[in-house]
Structure formats: structure tokens, C-alpha cells
Amino acid sequence: MSGLSSDRRRRPRIETSTETGLAVQVTGATKVFSVARGKQVVALEGIDLGVAPGEFVSLIGPSGCGKSTLLRLIADLDQPTSGTVSVFGKTARQARIDQDYGIAFQQAGLLPWRTVAGNIELPLELHRASTAARRMRVAELLALVGLSDFADRYPDQLSGGMQQRVAIARSLAESPELLLMDEPFGALDEMTRERMQNELVRICAETGAAVVFVTHSIPEAVFLSDRVVVMSPRPGRVREVIPVDLGSAEDRGDDLREATGFFTAVSAVREALHGSPTETGAPARGVDNR
Amino acid sequence: MRTAGSRTASILAPVILGVLVLVLWQLAVVGLHIKPYVLPSPTAIWEQFVRAFDTVWSGTRVTGTNALIGLLLGAVLGILAAIVSALLRVFDELTLPIVTAMSVVPIVALAPVLYAMFGAGAETGRQLIAALAVFIPVYVNTLRGLRQVRPVHRDLMRAYAATSWQATRTVTLPGALPFLFTGLRIASSLAVISALIAEYFGGPVDGLGKSITSAASYSNYALAYAFVLGSIVLGLVFYCVTLALEKLATRHRPSLS
């Protein structure tokens, strides 16, 4: 159970170094769901994606483009119909068993019968960390997400934003090198959302974890990411990968939201999303342009 | 949210009604010269209750112990069976017809058979009858609760590579608790009723049920009613305790209904 140190981002990764050295590598992944009456839906087709250690990658696209499905494949919550997914050079399944990633969903998914501290320590408890180690780590994480005064509260006594912070703290409990986040701020109001984004940038800088972040908000994707993966629906494909270079975490504050570079990147992602009409037939729906 | 005034009213109203009924009952018995074997007056019943309190209390203890043992035994078995059913679909499919059949059997009807099985001097038969009556609502409700795991929690447990027992212990069981306690609250009344009615069919002569029948057969109707009063109190105690447990278990939950 290592502490949080800002130099972890640059630490050489001996244990994870493989031929590719990638945190996540998805190669030719296709996912077909069987629905009612023998019909099949192609959720993902021929997805190739690499995420470097410490890199923040957002998946953005209209509803039904398979971005959540792709995240679930990386998390080994679903398996690809064909193609491969590897996490730190292992199979996704092995990486899940080895607890190489932390995960957060749109719903905080806290256990209502456990206190905030009890929820955060859940993964540590499941993996048999000692009581003392658990207590220390929970205190660190509570400080990290600014909830030190709420350790003994129950989820029903917290606001939605606070619940989501608990969920993020929980996903960080085992100091994962990879964070998988499925629209974690999707249910929050705009102001809370921006504050949470600022916090996430800071947390990522402190922990040095690679992040795969599913969202349908363009500004959110641009603000947070090193690269934005734009996806298109039916079947879900990667349409374009847009590098966003907005500087290090220390430079990303509320000022950035007003900066020219930010708007340029937002426009680039928006153009990629909507594409040329002849290519898609119709403009992408369900994408949040705020 | 109820205001303090309406809460007082909601407690006061049934109390007033109860008192009114008792007064009317008393007036009717006295005024219409109703014979005690038809209906004894409330004061006569209360008099008997106070006079024979030791007997009522010891009968309550015997029946209460039988009901409690039955409740605990039936609840433990019901919970275990529900867990196995939730984990193994095969077991669920095997037990479904049996449980359905059991739920329509009047379980007290088994009393004479069980007395023959365990001997007429033993309380075992009564406890088993209470346990059987308890088993069904606890099993059905717990199983329903175990099936209510939220998808996000299921995903989390998988992401944590939790073993199936770990997932059961940390998510499924606590999530099922409110359902379990609802089952237990329903079962608590059944436990008392079954333990008491089972006494009508034989066995040792020490419980409330037996005391009611023997007092009635000696034409001591006021005393019979005093024992009935004891049974009502016993049933209420079981109900209120399990209701309190249910409230405790659902403290931090969003309402289920």
C-alpha cells in the first residue's frame, strides 16, 4: 500500500514493462450483443486503442456508440466477441484478478449500509489488507477527496457530488496504475461537475495513474484529457483520435476553460464528432456541447 | 413528514376507539345481563388476569419460548435455504414446488403427527410447527431480497475480483437484510399463532393455548379470556420487537416500497 506521491507518474514501470509498454492495448476488438429473436447488435467493430502509462484518454461519442462497452471490455466486465484487450501486457481478465485498475461508474454505487470510510475501504477489505493499513489509506484518500470530516457519515447523508467523490476515493484505494471511469460526473450539476473535473486533474497528477474516461461532454473530455477518442455509432468505431495538449496538471485550472487552446480543441472534437454529413448520414445525437 | 400534532392524533385516535369499545362492551354485558359463558365483561377478564397472573405468565413463557425457538430455527433455515437458492439455480428449481406446496399446507395440521413422532411430553413438535410456519415467509422474502442486487454493485464486485462468497457477504446479504426483516416481522406473528394453536392438538399441558382450552372446558370463561389477553400481549411483543429490528435494518436505506 504505497502512499500518494507526485513522482509516481515518472517512475519506471518494471513490473508492467512489456513489448508495448502500454497500460491498455485494444486490438481489433469487436463486440456483438445478441438481442431478442436472434437479432444481433454490433456494439463495437474493429476497435484499436492504446493508452500509455499515466495518460488520460477520454472516449466520447453519441449515445449507443459503444464507449461504455469498450470500457467494460477493458475492465473485463464484458468480453470481446473477437479481438484482444490487454492491460499492462496481461489479459484483461488477469489484470482484473490482479486488481490493476480502479473503476468508477455514473452511479456512485456506494453501499448504503456502510459509512463513507467503510465504502472507501471496501476493496482493501476484500483483498485482506490489515486493519491498520486500511485505516491509514482511508485517511489519506479522505483527505485527497476533501471528505475527512465525513468519514462516519452514511451515503444517504451526502450530496450527489460528495457521493461521487467517495466513489472516486474508493476507485483509488489500491493505488491503481489505471483508472476506468464511466461518466462519473454525468449525473452531477454543471458547477459541481467543473469542480470535480478540477479535482480529478489534481488527483491524476498526484497518483500518476493512466485514465480511460467515458463522457458525452466535449468540454469535459477536452479539459481532462491528453487525447480524446471520438467514436461513431452503429457499429461503434473509432472515428478520430484528437491529441489535446493543454499542459500539465498545475496549469489546468478554471482559467484554462477560458483559454484559446481549450476552445480550439473543443472545436476540433466537435467537428470530429459531427463529421461530414455524407459520411454519417445525420449529425451525431446525444452529445453534450456544453 | 408528519407534524407532531398529526402524530399525536394518529396515536390518540385508536386509543380512544379502544377505550370506547371496552366501555360499550362493559355496558352491554352489565346492561343486557349477558351471561359470562356468552361473553364475560372486560372488568371480569381483567380481574381474572390479575388474580391468575402467575399462571398466565408461566403459560406465556412456555408458549413464548416455543415460538421464539421456532422463530429462530425457522429463520436460520429459511435464510440458509434462500442463500443456497440464490447461489444455485438448480436448488431453487428443486425447492420451488416444495415451498409452494408448503405455503398452502395448514402447518398446525401436522401437530398430532409431530406429537406422535417426538412424544406427547415434549415441546419439540410445537417448536417445529412454529419453525415450519416461519420458514416460508423468511425464505420467500430473503430470496427476493437476494435477487435485488443492483447491477452497479454486481459490476463492482466483479471488478474487485471478489469471490462469490465475498460478494454474497458484502453486497448481497446486507442488501437483502430489509427484505429478510420484513419476512421476519410477518413470521413473528405466525410463530406465536402456530405455537399456540399447536397446543390445541395435544402435547404437554403448560402453554397458553392449552390453558385457554382447559379454562373454557371448566366453564371459567373469564379466565380463558385472561389467557387470550396474555396471547395478545405475547403476539404484540413478538411483532413490535421484529418491527423495531426491521426499522433498525432499514435505517440508511432509501425506502423500499
Image (cartoon, rainbow, N blue to C red):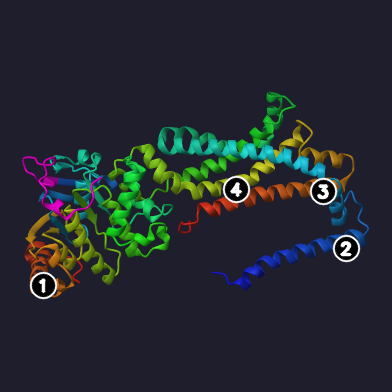
Q: Amino acid at mark 2?
A: Leu
Chain letter of the residue beneath label 1 in the structure image: A
Residue holding disc 3: B225
Which is more foreground, mark 1 or mark 2? 1
Task: State the separation of the CA atoms marked 1 and 4.
Answer: 62 Å
Task: State the separation of the CA atoms marked 2 and 3.
Answer: 18 Å
Quadrant in which residue A204 is drawn: bottom left
Task: State the separation of the CA atoms marked 1 and 2.
Answer: 88 Å
Dot 3 alpha-carbon crowd within 10 angstroms: few under 14, some 14 to 19, many 20 or more: many
Whether pointer 4 and pointer 2 mark residues with C-beta atoms closer than 8 Å, the reply is no
Residue holding disc 4: B186
First along the sequence among labels 4 and 2: 2
Q: Amino acid at mark 3?
A: Tyr
Q: Is residue A23 magenta?
A: yes
Q: Which residues are magenta?
A: A1-29
Whether pointer 4 and pointer 3 mark residues with C-beta atoms closer than 8 Å, the reply is no
Which SS does the magenta portion mostly show? loop
Residue B15 in percent (x, y) is at: 73, 64
Mark sitting on residue A263: 1
Q: Secondary structure at mark 3?
A: helix
Residue holding disc 2: B27
Task: State the separation of the CA atoms marked 4 and 3.
Answer: 25 Å
